[in-house]
Image (tube, rainbow, N blue to C red):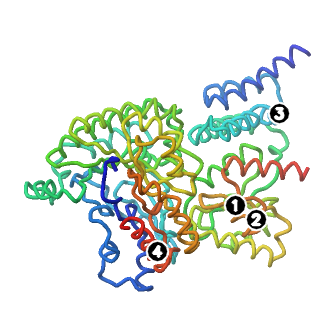
Amino acid sequence: MMFKNVDRAPFSEWCGYWDETILRWHCEGLPIGTSIDDYFGFDAGLMVPYVQVPLDMLLVPRFAERTLEEDEQHRVVVDKIGITKRIQKKSSSALGRMPQHLDWPVKTKEDFRKIKEKFNAEDPRRIGVTWSKELVEYYNSQREVPIGLHVPGFYGTARELMGMERLLVSFYKDPELMSEIFAFWADFILKMISKALPFRIDYAEIWEDMAYKNGPHISPRLFSEFILPHYRSFIDQLKKDGVRLFILDSDGDLRPLLPLLMEAGVNCIYPLEAQSGMDAPSLRKQYGEQLAMIGNIDKRALVAGKAVTRRELRSKSSLIDDGGYMPSVDHLVPPDISFNKYKYYVSLLRKQLFS
Amino acid sequence: MKVRLTEQNEILTKLQESIVNLDIKSVHSACQEALAANIPPVEAIEKGLSKGMRIVGQKFESGEFFLSELMMAGEVMKEGMKILEPHIKGGGYRKLAKIVVGTVEGDLHDIGKNLFVSLAKAAGFEVVDLGVDVSTDQFKKCVAKEEPEILGMSTLLTLTLPTVEGVVRALEKAKLRNRVKVIVGGAPVTPQFGKKAKVDCAAESAVEGVNRCLDWAKELT
């Protein structure tokens, strides 16, 4: 991913799979008890769950999960983040069980000041129970497996706490609150980074999900004003600590924000959703080796069948050869891709990577 | 009279600008000014606030505005309507047309749908929002009962796209399809899908969807 000479591009499915996809594939021949990466012989450490520094950057303690109301069709619950959700009980589809978000824990400055108590970087529970000198030594000795640091992003975290609609208007209605949230988050991340340093960190993965099919949720101006300075600060810190790869995770069409993200130090993005207009070959033409990429294999092509899948992979072949690109389906592999269709895609990818 | 017209135009411009500048304080004062100057509230809405929303829509389509600006403009519009609407004589604001809208069965996503609802209301439509996870039968019954000019369906999931086709088939079977324009929107929706599903419009964005509804409303008048 750093545009150096390598034997081949990574062979994996970085974004992973919907649970329902795996269930379907078990019915279609995927042996039960065999992991996908073992079945296909994917490279280790490049799929969910990635090998990452065991630090907990969520709320500590979590909210108590509870059911508020329930009928035959739906259940309304409060989750560990404090989000009230309506969940379908009987959907035949895992995707259909994606919940409707009804309410969020932060509506006012007072709510935020209260929830800040749950983001105490010094809380000992933030260090995972697996953390040990032995683990640090083992991870650091595993040169074949990249070690990641997951960084909950600024926009993404604020959206989890406030809900998207409230967040988007708060940039205008309550800019002071937004500045306070982002400054606090930057401070929290910097403190957490300092705890991760015993590990060799090969990449930082920043989760944002700040775009949809028609573009980013917020304008470049809002990003510059509220978020960009904080990106610079934590990326600069990690650079000083030797981290070289900064991977941004956002669905949707992120193109208008890319120059700013890159200015802050982001040098890799995923999953590059094709249905949102993201096109890895075009981005390579535009940004060259300044931007590595993961994903962009159009899931709809795999659904469409062999000829379209061949065409799709062919459109990425020069990127694969040039480096700085990890082919992967452009989001979680959905359950409308049959096991046979996926096997065909993997066989083509294997041929491309290993020939 | 000439001075008065100039003054009225200035107030209408202020109303527009408050929307375009995403300024809640200005919309409050401009609405109060409009009422004080005896501008009919419907005129203040149509020539002031709604005109501002159309400019916002254009800025969104040209890439100058993003989702945050679109949502905030909707908030400013709502604030203005809160002040102006109670002053409309004769029971309220005559709507352009009625839209029944919902997210299809199996899908609980509502942000795109809510944005469409907010923009459609701002544009002057009466909107019956059925919410999320709306069954084919609910859509059909609501079209029969409410007799809307437009039916809007939203879906985020590729898996629920066939449900849209099912609703269209159910409307055909119930002989309701010819009475209503059908519009669909959502991440996986493409013009090709729209053709396959036999809908009248597969909108790329909420703004495009509302613009198409405005075109249809013009055809109706």
Name the image quarter holding residue B134. bottom right
User: In this rendering, do the residues under marks 3 and 4 share a single chain?
Assistant: no
Chain to which the residue tagged by mark 4 belongs: A
CA neighbours of label 1 inside 10 A, class few (<14), some (14 to 19), many (20+): many
Q: Nearer the viewer, residue A154 or B141?
A: A154
Separation (CA) of disc 3 from disc 2? 34 Å
Q: Is residue B57 above or below residue B31?
A: below
Q: Is residue A105 visible?
A: no
Tell me the element at label 3: helix
Say what amino acid the circle numbered 4 marks. Answer: Tyr
Disc 4 secondary structure class: helix
Residue position for label 3:
B43
How far apart are labels 4 and 2 at the CA level? 31 Å
Residue at 46 percent across and 64 percent down: it is: A76
Q: Nearer the viewer, mark 1 or mark 3?
A: 1
Q: Mark 3 falls within which chain?
A: B
Q: Earlier in the sequence, mark 2 or mark 1?
A: 1
Q: Chain of mark 2?
A: B
The numbered disc on residue B199 is 2
The correct choice, above or below, for A279 with respect to A23 in the image is above
**At 47% across and 80% down in the image, what residue appears?**
A340
Residue for badge 1: B184
**Marks 4 and 1 share the same chain:** no
Whole-number angstrom distance, CA of label 1 to CA of label 3: 31 Å
Q: Which residue is mark 4?
A: A342
Marks 3 and 4, how far apart at CA: 59 Å
Q: Quadrant of residue A187?
A: top left
Do the CB atoms of the residues marked 2 and 1 lie less than 8 Å apart? yes
